[in-house]
Amino acid sequence: MAHKNLTRKQREFLRHRKEIMQTALSLFSQKGFANVSMQEIALKSEFAVGTLYKFFSTKEALYSEVFKEKVFELHSILVKALNIPGNEIKKMKTFIEKKIQWFTENMDYVRLYVTEIFGVGYIDKEEFSQLQEKNHVELVDEICRLFNSGIKKKIFKQIDPQILAISLNGLSNGLLFEMIENRDFKQIDPNSVLTIFLQSICLKGTDEVV
Amino acid sequence: MAHKNLTRKQREFLRHRKEIMQTALSLFSQKGFANVSMQEIALKSEFAVGTLYKFFSTKEALYSEVFKEKVFELHSILVKALNIPGNEIKKMKTFIEKKIQWFTENMDYVRLYVTEIFGVGYIDKEEFSQLQEKNHVELVDEICRLFNSGIKKKIFKQIDPQILAISLNGLSNGLLFEMIENRDFKQIDPNSVLTIFLQSICLKGTDEVV
DNA sequence: TCCGGAAATGAATCATGATTCATTGTTCGA
DNA sequence: TCGAACAATGAATCATGATTCATTTCCGGA
C-alpha cells in the first residue's frame, strides 16, 4: 500500500492506530464487546483513555473498524483459495483447508463474527449487512463458477451448482460450528468429512483425480 | 407434571412466573441480553420492577432460566425425532426436518443460542457448558446408534459412525447457519441438500428405501 | 367489617463505564 | 533556546440501568 511520502508524524499516527486496534481485537475477541471497557483497552495498549478518542470517535466505531478489517481478511483469503492454479477438486480442498485454518487460528475472533452475523451485534446493522451480503454473494458466485466448470469437465455429477455451493458452504460452516462448540473435536480430520461430500458429487473417486 | 394439590396462590405464583419468562424470552430474543432492561421487561409483562426480583434474584438468573428452558425443549424434540418408529432413513429425515422446523420457528431465539454456545454469552460458563456437553454427547451417541444399526442392516455404507454423526450434525447446522445468515435462503429446499448427503452414504438410492 | 401478613409497587440508590476537556508534555522551525 | 501547534493524559462528568426497600395494595379468616 501507499506507505512512502508520509511524514513521520503521519506514520506514527498510523502505527499507534494499529496498535490500539490490535489490543482492542484481542480484548473484544476474548470477552465480547460488552465486557470490555475503554479503560481496559487504554491500559493494555498503554495509551490514555482520552487518546483512544483521538483515534476513534466512540467505542462502537473502534469495534467496527477492528471487526471489519477481519471480515475483509477472511474474505480475501477465501477468494484467493478458489483461484489457485489446479483442477476443481484441488481448489475445493484448498478452500476448505484455508477456511478451517483461518477459523482455527482466529477462533476467538470467530465468536464475535458469529455474534454479529446472527444479528445481536453492535455494529450498525445496515452498513454491516450490506457488506456481508456483498461478500456472501461474491463467494457463492465464485463457488458456483467452480462447480460449473467441474461439471463441464465431467469431474462432478450434474447437480444444481447453487445447491452444491450452499451444501459445501453449509458443510464447512457446520464443521467449524462443531469445532468451536466441542473443543475436543480435533480428533476428527475435516478431510474425512470433506471426502464424504466429494464422494457424493464426483463422478470418479477423488484420489485418482487430485 | 404435578399441577394438582397446589393452592391457588401457588398456582398463581407459577403462572406469573411463566408470564414473566415469556415476555423476557421474546425481548431477549429480539434484542439480546445486553440491550434489554429490567424496566422494559417489567413494562411489557405488566409487573413492577421490584416484582421481577421476587421471582428471579438477578437479571442473569432470569435470562438463564429462560434460556435453559429452550435448550431442553430443542434437545427433547431432537431425541424424540431420532426415536420415531420407522427405518433409519426415515429417522434421519425426521431429525433434520424437526430441527429445521424448530430453528425456523424460533429463529430469534436461535441467535441467543448461538451467542451463548460460542462463548461470549451471559450464562455462567461452567454450568452451561456442562449442560451443553451432556446434551451434545447424548445426541451424538443417539445418532451413532442410528448409523450403526443402518450399517448393520446394509442400508448405509460402512463408514465410521462417529464421523457420519458429526457430518450430519455439521451439515444440518451449516444449513441453519446459511438460513439465518442469508434471509432469502428459503428458495432452497433443505431436503435437496440432505439428499446429496444420503446419496453418499447409502448403499442404494434413498427413494426406494423410504 | 376489620386485621395481619403476603404480594406488589416504583422512586431512590448505587455501580459501572462511556465520554469530555482542562491541563501537561512533546516536537520542531525560527 | 523559545514558544506555537499538536498530541497525550486521566480525573471529573454524565447516562444508563440493575437492584433495593419503604410504602401501598390485596386477600382470607375472625
Image (tube, coloured by chain):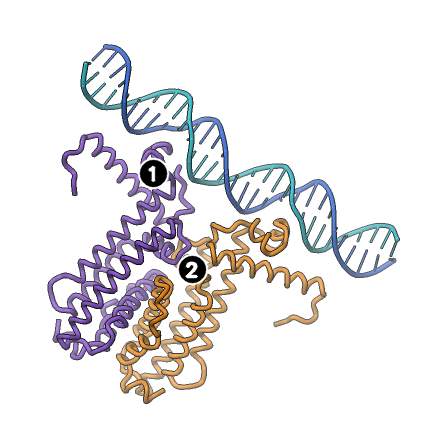
Chain colours: A purple, B orange, C cyan, D blue
Q: Quadrant of the N terminus of chain A?
A: top left
Q: x and y percent of residue A198 in the render?
A: 22, 74
Question: Tag count in the figure?
Answer: 2
Write the residue at 50% across / 62% down. Answer: B68
Front one among A96 and A59? A59
Residue at disc 2, secondary structure: helix
Q: Secondary structure at mark 1?
A: loop
Quadrant of the image for the C terminus of chain A? bottom left
Judging from the image, mark 2 belongs to the subunit labelled B
Viewer-closest of B99 and B6 = B99
Quarter of the image where one finds residue A46? top left
Residue D26 location (% of width, % of height): 74, 55
| Residue that mark 2 sits on | B111
Residue A156 is situated, as x and y percent measured from the top left of the image, at 18, 76
- Give the camera-side residue of B202 and B176: B176
Is residue B203 shown above or below C2? below
Q: Is residue B56 left or right of residue A101?
A: right
Spatial CA distance of label 2 from label 1 is: 29 Å
- Chain hosting mark 1: A
Vertical position of residue C15 compared to residue B140: above or below: above
Residue type pointed to by label 2: Arg
Three-letter residue code for mark 1: Phe
Mark 2: give few (<14), some (14-19) or many (20+) Cα within 10 Å: many
With B62 as the anchor, is A161 left or right in this view? left
Q: Are marks 2 and 1 in contact (CB under 8 Å)?
A: no
Image coords of residue A207 (percent x, y): 14, 74
Q: Which mark is residue A56?
A: 1
Q: Residues within 10 Å of mark 1 (few under 14, many from 20)?
A: some
Identified at 30% across, 42% down, the residue is: A21
The answer to whether residue A58 is left or right of residue A4 is right
